[in-house]
Amino acid sequence: MKLTIIGSGYVGLTTGACFAEVGHHVVCVDNDPRKVETLLAGQIPIYEPGLESLVKKNVAAKRLRFTTSTEEGVDHGEVLFIAVPTPPQADGSVDLSFIEKVAREISQFLDSYRVIVDKSTVPVKTGERVAQTIRRYAKPGVEFDVVSNPEFLREGSAVADLMKPDRIVIGGNTDRAIALMQKVYEPFAAPVLVTDINSAELIKHAANSFLALKISYANALSEICEASGADVIKVAEGIGADKRIGREFLNAGLGYGGSCFPKDIAAFIAIADQMGTPFTLLKEVQRINQRQIDRFIDGIREALWVLKDKKLAVWGLAFKPNTDDVRSSVAISVVEKLVSEGADVTVYDPKAMDKAKELAFASKVKFATSPLEAAAGAEALIIATEWPEFASVDLSELRTTMRAPMIFDGRNLIDPVAAADFGFQYRGIGRGVVETRA
Ligand SMILES: NC(=O)C1=CN([C@@H]2O[C@H](COP(=O)(O)OP(=O)(O)OC[C@H]3O[C@@H](n4cnc5c(N)ncnc54)[C@H](O)[C@@H]3O)[C@@H](O)[C@H]2O)C=CC1
Ligand SMILES: O=C(O)[C@H]1O[C@H](OP(=O)(O)OP(=O)(O)OC[C@H]2O[C@@H](n3ccc(=O)[nH]c3=O)[C@H](O)[C@@H]2O)[C@H](O)[C@@H](O)[C@@H]1O
């Protein structure tokens, strides 16, 4: 099929490449000329495992191309996917101006039937607004349908998630549009759930909120574990073994971050308020998430006594491993907090340093080229992102290079007993303080 993706970021580019991989002919549109130039030059603007080879292969096979022209995209695709940003506003509600703009742009070039699919994460009832906008600006009589097809991929495993999704949700109001959407997804051999548009939109916010709720549940447990001397990892294993609960997303840590959970939970709260059905449970989820980072910083301050002029190493800047994405990264919030209290911070991340260097905090920290270089002379090490490379650092070398042996492990990455054996004082999340045994 001929498909168009409007917005070629983390979601649009990966989706476009995966659609091309299963045989569709895909045009990816982006209104950022620099991004399109980069893509046309054969480079990938983001780090996502497996994406570069997929893009190159499908560009070479002439199933994937890039343009800045929405007109070309509308002309090409029988189905037009919208994958533009839906950022938060100050009050938590979504800024839908990118979606509205694309709807107007599409309507300008619409000559014959198209399915216009919202893949961006949007509040319930956005589809109705998109249809209304296109109807208002398009030529009279031109036919189209609007569909909601939320995306559930995770950064860091986006290609795998797209190629083998748990489910595909198609929210549509006409058989014609739903049939075309089923054809798009046929090659993926995944379970398809067909719903009305409003339900599909709600599924996305409800799914992300539930995952965030699971994380906050684990984080709330971590506090009781610390107070009682229990181990949150064992508790998570114990409850997660029940299939009705499941072990995934019960990892206590610094709280959820990234470009999606914080904004989507705020957006769901805002739309529920607007509907007159306040979702107060989610406000508690947010509160626990904030409390987790505050407690972590309190723990560092309590252990180190004074933060001013302390030489600290921070491992990890990305909001999670296997990505270079630093948007709303909790790791960066931790660094900013330490810097604001006068600490002398050196940071290292395997993939996210270039993106981090573009942010305001960058001028106030030093960037190292390896985990051990970051830790050289440090009076404490803070682990903020659970990159596998950090788990394999030689603890004996780490001990030798640091000035004082303290590890604050915000992601429970290091084995506390091993750390203690090598002479460290170790503080994880929900696992108490383990004193040095060396
Ligand atoms: N990043 C993720 O893991 C996931 C994101 N989502 C949702 O997908 C949407 C997009 O997110 P990302 O891909 O992360 O954002 P992104 O910022 O990486 O990409 C969006 C792209 O849209 C382009 N764009 C903006 N306005 C445009 C226009 N008028 N015409 C053409 N291109 C335009 C931007 O230049 C940018 O390249 C958001 O609603 C997000 O919540 C959903 C699932 C996963
Ligand atoms: O809507 C979205 O954009 C996406 O948001 C999340 O994906 P993503 O943000 O890429 O990453 P996650 O793996 O979900 O992690 C989000 C945050 O939660 C944290 N997390 C995750 C799991 C856990 O057990 N504990 C925990 O603290 C991570 O460190 C990270 O900061 C969802 O998992 C995707 O299904 C969804 O499509």
Image (cartoon, rainbow, N blue to C red):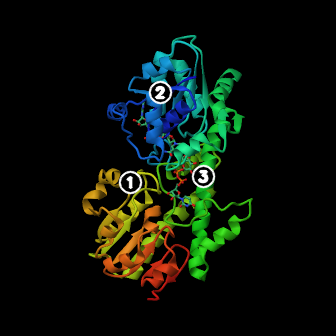
**Badge 3 amino acid:** Ser
**Badge 2 amino acid:** Ala
Instruction: Tell me whether the residue at label 2 lies in contact with that at label 3, contact meaning CB atoms closer than 8 angstroms.
Output: no
Measured as percent of width and height from the top left, residue 228 is found at 60, 82
Q: Nearer the viewer, residue 317 or 291?
A: 317
- Residue 351 got which mark? 1
- Residue 16 got which mark? none
Indicate whether 120 appears above or below 417. Answer: above
Task: For ligand 1, tell me if the residue under mark 2 lies within 8 Å.
Answer: no
For this view, does 345 lie left or right of residue 59? Answer: left
Q: Nearer the viewer, residue 23 or 386?
A: 23
**Badge 1 amino acid:** Lys
Label 3 sits on a secondary structure element that is: helix
- Residue 209 got which mark? 3
Residue drawn at x 41%, y 76% as measured from the top left: 395
Indicate whether 236 appears above or below 135. Answer: below
Residue drawn at x 30%, y 68% as measured from the top left: 373
- Asked whether residue 36 is in view, the answer is yes
